[in-house]
Image (cartoon, grey):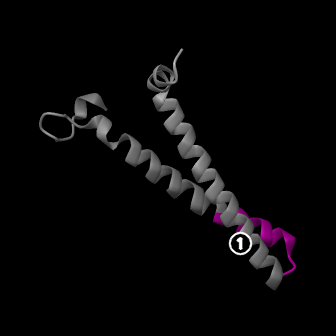
């Protein structure tokens, strides 16, 4: 199977996984940075964990949702009129 055929066949799965990986990496690095900053000012490990998880989810979810929306917004448009096609949803 050629690379072009493979990509055409599994394009949706590849783009979805790319979005997951990028969003997860952004969340990971943001939470690591927040954890480091919090640890410099406070010594409470429990609160540090809570803050770190909150930062991770506050970065991961919006980044993933935005990338997923951008990749799939054209899927539900009628190519002839450019209007939203509710029957495809």
Judge whether residue 87 can be spotted in this image. yes
Q: Quadrant of residue 56?
A: bottom right
Q: Mark 1 falls on what kind of element?
A: helix
Which residue ends up furthest to the top in the rendered image? Answer: 1
Most common SS among magenta residues: helix
* Viewport quadrant of the N terminus: top right
- Taking depth in this image into account, of 42 and 76 the one nearest to the observer is 76
- Taking depth in this image into account, of 46 and 33 the one nearest to the observer is 33
Q: Which residues are magenta?
A: 42-55
Q: In the figure, 53 relative to 77: above or below?
A: below
- Residue 43: in magenta span: yes
Q: Which residue is mark 1?
A: 34
Q: Residue at x 46, y 50 (%)?
A: 67
Horizontal and vertical percent for residue 21?
Answer: 61, 46
Q: Residue at x 44, y 53 (%)?
A: 66
The answer to whether residue 37 is left or right of residue 80 is: right
The answer to whether residue 42 is left or right of residue 59 is: right
């Amino acid at each position: 199977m050629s690379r072009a055929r493979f990509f055409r066949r599994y394009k949706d799965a590849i783009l979805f996984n790319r979005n997951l990986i990028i969003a997860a990496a952004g969340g990971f690095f943001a939470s690591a940075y927040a954890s480091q900053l919090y640890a410099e000012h406070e010594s409470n490990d429990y609160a540090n964990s809570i803050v770190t998880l909150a930062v991770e989810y506050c970065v991961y979810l919006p980044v993933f949702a935005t990338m997923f929306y951008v990749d799939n917004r054209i899927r539900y448009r009628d190519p002839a009129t450019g209007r939203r096609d509710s029957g495809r949803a």
